[in-house]
Image (cartoon, grey):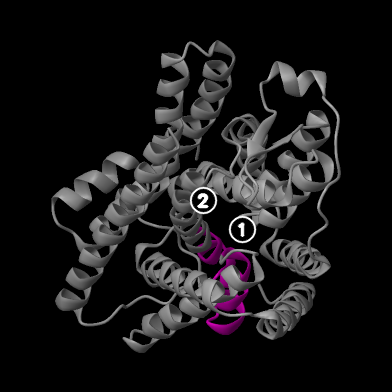
Amino acid sequence: MENRIGAILRAGVIVSALLVICGGIMYLSRYGTVGPAFAHFKGEPERLKDIYGIIRSALSLHPRGIIQLGLLCLIATPIMRVIFSLGMYAKHKDSLYVVITSIVLCLLLYSLIFVR
Amino acid sequence: MGTIEQPLLIALGSILAGFIGVLTGLGGGVVIVPLLTLVFGVDIRYAIGASLVSVIATSSSAAATYVKEGYSNLRVGMFLEIATTMGALSGAFLALWIAPRVIAVIFGLALLHSAYTSWQGIKESTETKADRLAQMLGMDSTYPTPVGPKFYHVQNIPGGFLLMMVAGALSGLLGIGSGALKVIAMDRIMKLPFKVSTTTSNFMIGVTAAASAGIYLNRGYIDPLLAMPVMLGVLLGASIGTHWLMKSRTKSLRILFGIVILILAVEMIFNGIEGRF
């Protein structure tokens, strides 16, 4: 179980870092500079805020969408670890920890999908 | 500001932050937010968003190594993640209602506290007795030592749970891993062995940060062009730091970086009170 969890975490970090690097290179080669300053808070546009917007933006090869997809993968990495643990506890019929893990998973999915 | 220099400098600063984070044992997040806000003039909300992302990256890649070594107590971690994720959600909600300057002051105080605990050093907990709740939750376990696996009991779960909620709330409010507080909850209150506490804390940081990062993403606080150099820089700096730790004695460097963190903490508090956020 420990080895599989380690592999999931490492894979998640590598995939997201690769996406972020790809998006970054695309952005730089297209615009030459990294434009905006971050001194004033404006908030991100709608298409870089929620899961569907980010996936759509990345699929149409917008550089910032690809970077954001990489960051989304990173946020999803601990969630994948929790889902895997849930599967393992269920397999071992450890019902107490199935409940505990499900509570954590619900809180994580709630924050990622529903909360503004 | 639309130049190539700014992101390059942010990346370099983030490498240093990741390096300091590993050497002090405090994690990259505690250095990233002061660096971005004080040095680069980034809005604290964007800084917290970028910091959370880098916290997930470093804790996940470090946890991948620690978990295999068999120190982390996965059951204790999973159970306490209920507390940290609930705390993280409330911290992220609170962030909407608290003025950025107040967040800066709270950040400075949290920084002072974690610098203080990292200076205190390790106090190995003594022999403990069985606790009914811990037995019910199947938490008692063993950890590897040079003379073979050593058994330990877990104590005072309610106390640890409460402090973990505070740690989660600070993580969601400030964009840090809250590793120092998590270690105190497990090491001092629940009486876990120190190495088990630090590795389990690191293991939990990813899930805690993911809970608030999801909210920050939905709110538009995570900017891809800022998070890119920060995340890649911190990851690189942290891996350099890990190799460095294995090779050399770093006592004097730790003291130096402790002073750096102290200065950052005072600056955050001062600038927050002055209303520069």
Amino acid type assigned to the residue bearing label 1 in the image: Ile
Residue B130 is situated, as x and y percent measured from the top left of the image, at 82, 25
Q: Quadrant of the N terminus of chain B?
A: bottom left
Stretch of the chain drawn in magenta: B29-49
The part of the image, by quadrant, that contains residue B34 is bottom right
Helix, strand or loop for disc 2: helix
**Label annotation for residue B66:** 2
- Residue at the disc numbered 1: B176
Dot 2 amino acid type: Tyr
Please say if A25 is above or below B99: below
In three-dimensional space, the C-alpha distance between marks 2 and 1, rounded to whole angstroms, equals 20 Å
Q: Position of residue B96 (x, y in %)?
A: 63, 49
Vertical side of B167 occupied by A28: above or below? below
Q: Quadrant of residue B218?
A: top left
**B113, above or below B271, in the image:** above
Main structural element of the magenta stretch: helix, strand or loop? helix
State the residue at coordinates (58%, 77%). B35
